[in-house]
Amino acid sequence: MTHEPRRRRSLLANDALDDDELERIRRYEDFRTIDWIQDSILERSRRIRAARKFNASHRGPRGEVTVSWLWTQFRKAVDGGQTWFVVSLVGVCIGLNAAIISIVTEWLSDIKMGYCHDGWWLNQQFCCWEIDTEDVDGCDSWHPWSTVGVARWSIYVIFAAMFSFVAAHLVRTLAKYAAGSGISEIKCILAGFVMQGFLGFATFFIKSITLPLVIASGLSVGKEGPSVHVACCIGSLVAGMFGKFQRSQGKMREIVTAASAAGVAVAFGAPIGGVLFSIEEMSHTFSIKTMWRSFFCALMATVTLSAMNPFRTGKLVLFQVTYDRDWHFFEIIFFIILGIFGGLYGAFMVKFNLQVAAFRRKFLAKHGVAEAVILATITAMIGYSNQFLRMDMTESMAILFRECDNGGNVNNVCQSSLQWRISNSLLLATVIRIGLVVISYGCKVPAGIFVPSMAIGATFGRMIGIMVKAMYTAYPTSGIFAFCDPDAPCITPGTYAFLGAAAALSGVMQITVTVVVIMFELTGALTYILPTMIVLLVTKAVGDFLGTNGIADEMIRFNGFPFLEKEDHAFNVSVNAVMRKDLATLTESGMRVKDVEATLAATEFKGFPVISDDGARILVGYVGRTELNYVLERSRKTQDITPDTLCLFKAEGGGDGDMDDFELGGALGVGIDNEEDFAETILENTASGGREIKFWPWVNQTPLTVSPQLPLEIVMQLFKRMGPRVILVEDHGTLAGLVTVKDVLRWIAVEKPEGEPSWDERGGLDGMLEEVWTWASQVVAPIQNWSLNLVNRNRSRH
């Protein structure tokens, strides 16, 4: 029954063939989860093979340098530097793409208002380059489409509708994954969820084309979230051109993580903030090696964007600003108000946007193009009358963030005589944009929520800043304002807009450290780190009190993706309460091809436990569905097999002698060079003259197992940190069940383990208002009764 060891070892020299072929098959299995343990085993096997190949070449008999030795050293150097080359190339491509998108977006946004007579390809800024003005009509070279207000409004609305129609139509017909932000899905992909095509070329190309159209249409969505998706597409496409990353899911995950950091870096001009975003928001596990590569990729992308200089101002993003004034401690009171607003905005946005998403899924699933056009038309019709809604959101933030000195009085935002009219306009812009973002985020076009949230916070913050400045102007020497220097400006409304933007972004995404660093890199103002931290601390506290999760996590839960949250929870149950007990199993021997095919046809499981054939259900190993189909298909091609052909899932005699000849104890490491080798190695003649198929080299004989009494929290940690697809549960060697991430999520959703009631379970906003009203009534009623008794007593005396 056994083959010659020499023959088997010769086969092992070519064992990469099966690994690569199996991996190609697995790529077409959409919506599966990656087994990171298995991927690590495969990567270790490839690393051992590469080391053997490199070590096979030695110096000459006297130690002289040979050509083969020099070639081997060169190959080692190339292999060692390939990762850094790929990371650099990904960063450069991301920077180039971001610069092109920024330039096209600016031109499309301005073309709605008019055109440049000197060159149709110039936006308003470059057309009026020699004239430093921010007027609506620009300069003599810039020609508005019409001088009549109604006609100008009509053209503005028509362009908005046209841009949104083209974008939505391209997304629907060519790349459905180009819709939305993409951050939720990328988080799942980095955790091991496979979505074929989500990082493909069609998605990258269509999203890069439609993103400027969507932003120029005026929809209340941003480009920063989609920029992260586009960056990850670039990382996946570039790394996919190199076999080292194409074969290894773990190495590909490192590149995609680094690309996500670069995407945030070019979106905000904040390389360090991008790295922190990938750590805090995107990745479950983050090694120091991945952090360095993320930083290097973000650095290369930022340097490339800076070299391109898309705005010709030296700024990486339009709303970069510099503050040279300090703040006062009494302003902390108003900073807390901004933080409370950020927390309330985040809770409101998450709650009602999910309701809109449910409505969209139920009634508008087949009307994505019409929905996008209607939303863009409504946004343009409503927003044209408000100067802060009419202009691009990044341009609006650039105006609101500025100090009032040195040309900061754009659109009369610093005009004292118009401060209340500006405040009313800012309040109206805040309320309207909140409503527009609630209904727009999630429509079937590329849509982010970073910049819309920041724009909402900026308009609210600037309004608060104008009101505080008006209070100081009216009472400069009284109360808290007595600490201000009378010879220098006391209140800077631009900083309130800046802090409001940070609060709103943190409130809707539920990230803190990343926002602090991004805001610091945007302003370079070291003195405003403490106010930013105070604002975000209050925002986080309000969000935690209301039980708010980040909108990306909520969208993951809404879409039903298998994703475990980073936060740990105490469930006080063992894995026995969660595991699946009705299992489809395979026995180690005695099964025939027809039995295996019947099991495959009757179930849709991704793998099957292998148990002993003596009825004791002793766990022998675990084999995947892909491996079973692969061996059966290859067996049919090489030899004639019948439905009665025997199937072996365990080597005879315990397999010790045979297994020593195979790397890692399984056919994950076995290699077959051609069809003849496959037939000779896998198919054997039995003593009775029949044939049998050896499946045991493909069986994982050391699967991850736990005891039924193990707490569920520890099992969840195993899923998060080690990344297995399935964990088998055995009781003293006997198979008791298995558990997957989906089983855990299903149990959490159905059983609703004991804990603090969530914001929705407490009744949401209505419930909170009712609780406050009840509490106030309980407090006020005794005081009111005491007052009435006192009044009646005084009356009786008189």
Image (cartoon, grey):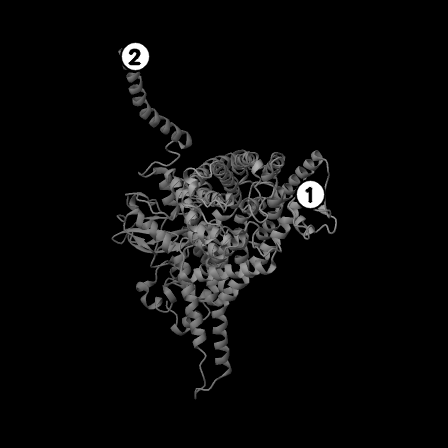
In front here: 127 or 343?
127
Residue annotated with mark 2: 795
The percent position of residue 206, horizontal first and vertical second, equals 60, 50
Residue that lies at the very extreme toward the left in this rendered image:
732
Q: Amino acid at mark 2?
A: Arg
The percent position of residue 696, horizontal first and vertical second, equals 38, 60
Q: Amino acid at mark 1?
A: Asp
Residue 364 appears in view:
yes
SS at mark 1 in the image = loop
In front here: 205 or 400?
400
Residue 368 sits in quarter:
top right
Residue annotated with mark 1: 137
Res 756 label: none
In the displayed structure image, the side of residue 576 where residue 720 appears, left or right: right
Q: Is residue 54 above or below residue 393?
A: below
The percent position of residue 457, horizontal first and vertical second, equals 50, 41
Residue 639 appears in view:
no
Q: Dot 2: few (<14), some (14–19), or many (≥20) neighbours within 10 Å? A: few
The percent position of residue 48, horizontal first and vertical second, equals 41, 69
Residue that lies at the very extreme toward the bottom in this rendered image:
62
Marks 2 and 1 sit apart, C-alpha to C-alpha, by: 72 Å
